[in-house]
């Protein structure tokens, strides 16, 4: 057990403040206990003085891409993309085809470290490595476990690299699902045939899980669906019963009409918003009106900082949704409802972040949301507890040697970049 004393504890649901000590149990389903004074009868493995600091539930990422971790600083693509499809073809599909197992391992380790240092203790990831599919999910899982970050993974099944790769990806997903909590990943409707889509839905049903797919990230997805299937993207997913599971995640959802929004609102599926990625790819702005309230936030591989993602939603979305600071905070926390409702492991109350937030103004339950969007950033993350274990102390990851991993990842990035230029 870890003992936190002199805490200003913030209930992440109600935003109620309490001055208290906290005992933190270890384990995937560990709890936290509140005390006025340290109990003599309990033995603690660590004690942290949190005087002047804020303690609250750690963060979670609703949509990440481990495979993009080594992209930072890479050279320009062979052709300058002029639309979203070319961004995929000349950047991301070029990159993912060059990944090998060592690169995947490096990508997963540095992603998990970045998440931990940003207060993120649970990650939902959507992976792609067409030339290194086998064992890729387990490589990622092992890396995240080593750092101490919980996860819900899937492999991005697609027909774009040939049906032989489709079958390998389906088998990789099946094997991983036999022993792990996971989703069944699909790239997007425009790279998935009806046959592959149905196989993925059947696989998800067989293992009582959901689909994780990019939806209408760009207008091209809708254009392709209409040209090839004569129905819109959400209608096609509905026709294959892909929206029935409450575990299903629809990424992006920018180009939807009113009918599609109504279908989602009346389904069990969840939507994940990725503001900064949409801005980077110049595909447009998300508008959650009429989709329902099952909307959470992700980073789409841009970075691992969920606080930054939330602030971007607030600032960049003012002309499109005009969300209040409280509404943005609630969307930021919605991923925890998804995890809890679906009984995934790794996000119990013993996941905590301790913030050294040196506010120049008063902070309380009534104005916390304002501090959330205008003040609190990842630089304030001091300690992180994941599943009852202290994985970040004084801003330093305690579970792995970060310097060695960064040296390894730099070596892998050079190898990857050279491969991409061939």
Image: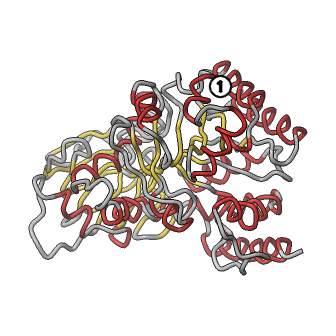
Q: Which residue is mark 1?
A: 204
Q: Residue at 79% across / 64% down in the picture?
A: 94
Figure check: 248 above or below 120: above
Q: Is residue 337 left or right of residue 104?
A: left
Q: Nearer the viewer, residue 372 or 95?
A: 95
Query: At which x and y percent is residue 75?
Result: 72, 81
Q: Could one spot residue 148 in this view of the protein?
A: yes
Q: Quadrant of the C terminus?
A: bottom right
Tag 1 secondary structure: helix
Residue 86 occupies which quadrant of the picture? Answer: bottom right
Query: At which x and y percent is residue 354?
Result: 32, 60
Residue 66 occupies which quadrant of the picture? Answer: bottom right
Q: Nearer the viewer, residue 421 or 218?
A: 218
Q: Local crowd at mark 1 within 10 Å, few (<14), some, or many (≥20)?
A: many
Q: Residue at 74% across / 73% down in the picture?
A: 413
Q: Nearer the viewer, residue 305 or 248?
A: 248
């Amino acid at each position: 057990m870890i003992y936190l004393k002199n805490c200003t504890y913030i209930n992440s649901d109600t935003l109620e403040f309490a001055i208290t000590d906290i005992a933190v149990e270890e384990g995937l389903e560990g709890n936290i206990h509140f005390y006025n004074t340290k109990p003599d009868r309990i033995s603690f493995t660590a004690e942290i003085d949190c005087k002047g600091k804020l303690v609250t539930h750690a963060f979670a990422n609703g949509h990440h891409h481990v495979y993009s971790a080594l992209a930072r600083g890479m050279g320009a693509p062979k052709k300058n993309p002029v639309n979203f499809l070319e961004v995929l073809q000349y950047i991301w599909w070029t990159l993912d085809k060059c990944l090998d197992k060592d690169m995947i391992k490096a990508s997963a380790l540095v992603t998990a470290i970045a998440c931990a240092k940003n207060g993120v203790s649970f990650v939902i990831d959507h992976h792609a490595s067409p030339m290194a599919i086998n064992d890729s999910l387990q490589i990622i899982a092992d890396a995240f476990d080593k750092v101490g970050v919980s996860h819900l993974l899937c492999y991005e099944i697609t027909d774009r690299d040939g049906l032989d790769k489709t079958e390998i990806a389906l088998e990789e997903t099946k094997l991983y699902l036999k022993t792990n909590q996971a989703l069944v990943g699909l790239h997007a409707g425009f790279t998935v045939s009806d046959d592959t889509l149905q196989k993925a839905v059947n696989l998800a049903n067989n293992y009582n899980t959901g689909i994780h797919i990019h939806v209408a990230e760009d207008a091209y997805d809708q254009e392709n669906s209409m040209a090839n299937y004569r129905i819109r993207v959400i209608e096609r997913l509905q026709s294959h019963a892909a929206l029935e599971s409450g575990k299903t995640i629809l990424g992006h959802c920018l180009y939807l009409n009113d009918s599609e929004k109504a279908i989602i609102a009346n389904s069990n599926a969840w939507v994940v918003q990725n503001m900064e990625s949409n801005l980077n790819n110049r595909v447009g702005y998300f508008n959650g009106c009429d989709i329902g309230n099952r909307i959470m936030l992700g980073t789409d591989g841009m970075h691992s900082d969920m606080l930054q993602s939330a602030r971007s939603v607030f600032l960049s979305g003012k002309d499109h949704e005009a969300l209040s600071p409280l509404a943005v905070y609630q969307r930021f926390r919605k991923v925890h409802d998804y995890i809890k409702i679906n009984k995934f492991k790794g996000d119990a109350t013993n996941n905590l972040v301790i913030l050294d937030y040196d506010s120049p103004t008063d902070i309380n339950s009534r104005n916390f949301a304002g501090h959330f969007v205008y003040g609190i950033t990842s630089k304030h993350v001091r300690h992180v507890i994941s599943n009852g274990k202290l994985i970040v102390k004084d801003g330093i990851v305690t579970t792995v040697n970060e310097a060695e991993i960064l040296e390894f990842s730099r070596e892998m990035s050079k190898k990857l970049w050279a491969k991409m230029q061939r």
